[in-house]
Image: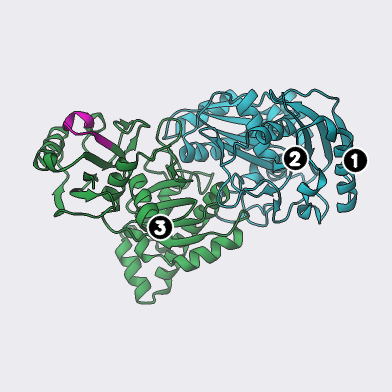
Chain colours: A green, B cyan
Amino acid sequence: MRYALGIDVGGTKIYSAIIDECGKIVSEIEKNPTPKTYEEIKSLFESIIRKHENDIDIVAFSTCGAVNNENNHILGSTGNIAKGYPDMPFCDLSSKPVFVENDANCAAWAEYKIGASKGTKVSVMLTLGTGVGGGIIINNQLLKGQNGAAGEMHFKMYSDKRRKCTCGSWDCFEIYASGKGLKLTGEEISNNPDITTYDIVEGVNNNDSRMIEIFNKWQDDITNGIIGLANIFDPDCVVLSGSMAEFVDVEKIQNNANKEIITTPIEVKKATAGNYSGMIGAALLAFEKGVL
Amino acid sequence: MRYALGIDVGGTKIYSAIIDECGKIVSEIEKNPTPKTYEEIKSLFESIIRKHENDIDIVAFSTCGAVNNENNHILGSTGNIAKGYPDMPFCDLSSKPVFVENDANCAAWAEYKIGASKGTKVSVMLTLGTGVGGGIIINNQLLKGQNGAAGEMHFKMYSDKRRKCTCGSWDCFEIYASGKGLKLTGEEISNNPDITTYDIVEGVNNNDSRMIEIFNKWQDDITNGIIGLANIFDPDCVVLSGSMAEFVDVEKIQNNANKEIITTPIEVKKATAGNYSGMIGAALLAFEKGVL
């Protein structure tokens, strides 16, 4: 049995643990807040790696940001983390091999190997959190694209410039289907700029008709995006993960999407690989190098 | 050298010719209007095949409609052609092997093997005609999906039900980026229900500012769709083919798209494999069976 040191790098937290070839976490999970500077992040990586280096075969990073096809470097810039972070020389951090992949791609791979999309031919995973991530698996290979950046869920929901997206463009799926999207839909419908996603979810639980209207609009936006992706990929299933996915009604989304899809019907499922699917997927990908 | 009998089946015309392994047409091209009934279409296929059967190794159909992953049957229904057509028993029409693929996929494959996207890693082809077809090639394989229907360009351009699409859903890319989409954009902007795509193109040539406004709106819709596809696939290039593609300004589309794409820059090119790319691509695919 081989072992990977999985390190999941997000904007607020960095998780790490040792993971075996079955995707099982076999050590304690270490949690650190993400340091504010490049140097501090690098030092944290070095100290985590130093601790475990003798017990592992490979270091597997699941990181925010798009990662190149050689799985050793971040492409372009990355929001929500120290400015210099994309220049991190991942491979110099350990004497063991180092593998790097985008966090949404890693989570999609974990779902495909041990979770909700296990056994499928074509699957699309959408991570609904503060933003939206995407990972697409086609015939046992991760869709990476020309340079490795594929799977960005920035296709337009409107073409008349209503909401500025975090990417700088307008009306991307992310700015409608994310937690931020739910808040913006809430602001628009309630005319209350201070409304929070918590208010909306709480309101739905209390049967507040206005909050239900907001929530349904948000869920319809997710459904509309899924319809387009299904017509493009003809997938077996679409997996929804991330903190916002726990609130959605996957059965309703599946039924409504299948009414409009012109390819073949899909299943819509919630992710089952758990909160650490990023580092688990990174480890499993690192073992397999199953990257297009 | 092996030879295929290529048969391209569209809603109005059926082309056929013998094609060699290099994608070269080595016989006269036969053109027939598409018969109105299933029986007449079947008889026409039989008579074309009978004529050439002894000189070929395989029969390669490029057809309207989605085709299954076994490349022997059409999935679901198909507009603009005799109602029973999707049940055509293609493989029973010849004593030689028969290969069937969707026409947009075939044309995309021809561009990839001998045309505008030759040598690329990931390419997206959009066929802009009366409707819009799509074909996606990833690492030398055609994206077919779960059941073979992938590549349908029915993702939404708006989420508030403005234009009914031919697929029965609302506001798909097809109903904005097609020739029909240009006419509808013309109707909306000019308030003239009788405006034709010809009027618009002619008006643009004569420097009519209203017609230029209509045309630019249509071209911006195409650009917006390409931005989404580029963020999803991170392709080397997007190829535009079909009767409407001759009017577009690919350089302008490329520049505007690259301003918004967050993956990596793309090239936008016009197709170069010619009017018979459907049957050429069908033949080349039949030889290679390069289908995911």
**Nearest-to-viewer mark from 2 and 1:** 1
Q: Which residues are magenta?
A: A88-99
The quadrant of the image that shows the N terminus of chain B is top right
Amino acid type of the residue that numbered disc 3 sits on in the rendered structure: Leu
Left or right: A287, with A117 as reference point: left
- Measure the C-alpha gap from mark 3 to mark 2: 38 Å
**Front-most of B96 and A42?**
B96
Q: Which mark is residue A240?
A: 3
Q: Which mark is residue B61?
A: 2
**Residue A148 falls within the magenta-colored stretch:** no
Q: Which mark is residue B185?
A: none
Q: Is B50 situated above or below B165?
A: above
Amino acid type of the residue that numbered disc 2 sits on in the rendered structure: Phe
Q: Secondary structure at mark 1?
A: helix
Q: Is B161 situated above or below B111?
A: below
**Residue A96 falls within the magenta-colored stretch:** yes
* Quarter of the view holding residue A89: top left
